[in-house]
Image (cartoon, rainbow, N blue to C red):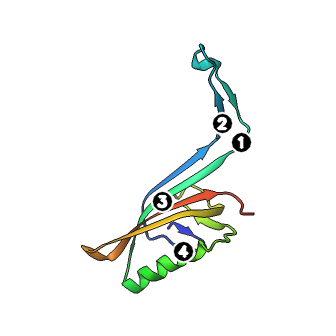
């Protein structure tokens, strides 16, 4: 069961995690790529993108939306993220960057949503 801040994320359809070295790259004119200058000066970052489906009554859907948007209150202090990938350890401090949800009139018993999380410490 995937969750953020203790909120069950329902049926996670996809989870993509990207860890990036954010390397500074400077190619050298008239040289091949093996001569490029690479500097590891910016540190690591991890982005987590989740797409899921939350099924429930209109009231349950509204509660889910309000709970997620409640975390995104403009002064986030970090939330625990539990991955849908059972072998992945919990990530203890993520900030919610983006939350998007869609309801389809063909099936109002569910909402499709996407979340973008960034790992780190809020200051």
- Disc 3 from disc 4: Cα separation: 15 Å
Label 3 near label 1: C-beta < 8 Å? no
- Disc 3 from disc 2: Cα separation: 25 Å
The crowding category of the residue bearing disc 3, from other C-alpha atoms within 10 Å (few below 14, some 14 to 19, many at least 20), is: many
Residue at the spot of label 1: 42
Left or right for 37, reference 71 = right
- What is the count of numbered marks? 4
The image's mark for residue 106 is none
Sequence-wise, the earlier of marks 1 and 4 is: 1
From the top left corner, tell me how far across and down residue 67 is, in percent: 54, 78
Residue at the spot of label 4: 69
Which of discs 3 and 2 lies nearer the camera? The answer is 2
Label 2 near label 1: C-beta < 8 Å? yes
- Disc 1 from disc 2: Cα separation: 7 Å
The image's mark for residue 50 is 3
Residue at the spot of label 2: 23
């Amino acid at each position: 069961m995937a969750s953020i801040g203790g909120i069950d994320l329902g049926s996670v359809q996809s989870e993509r995690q990207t860890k990036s070295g954010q390397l500074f790259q400077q190619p050298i004119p008239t040289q091949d790529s093996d001569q490029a200058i690479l500097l590891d000066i910016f540190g690591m970052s991890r982005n987590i993108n989740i797409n899921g489906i939350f099924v429930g009554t209109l009231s349950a859907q509204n509660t889910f939306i309000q709970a997620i948007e409640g975390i995104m209150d403009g002064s986030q202090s970090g939330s625990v993220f539990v991955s849908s990938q059972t072998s992945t350890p919990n990530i203890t401090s993520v900030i919610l960057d983006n939350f998007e949800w869609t309801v389809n009139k063909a099936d109002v018993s569910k909402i499709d949503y996407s979340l973008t999380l960034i790992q780190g410490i809020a200051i």
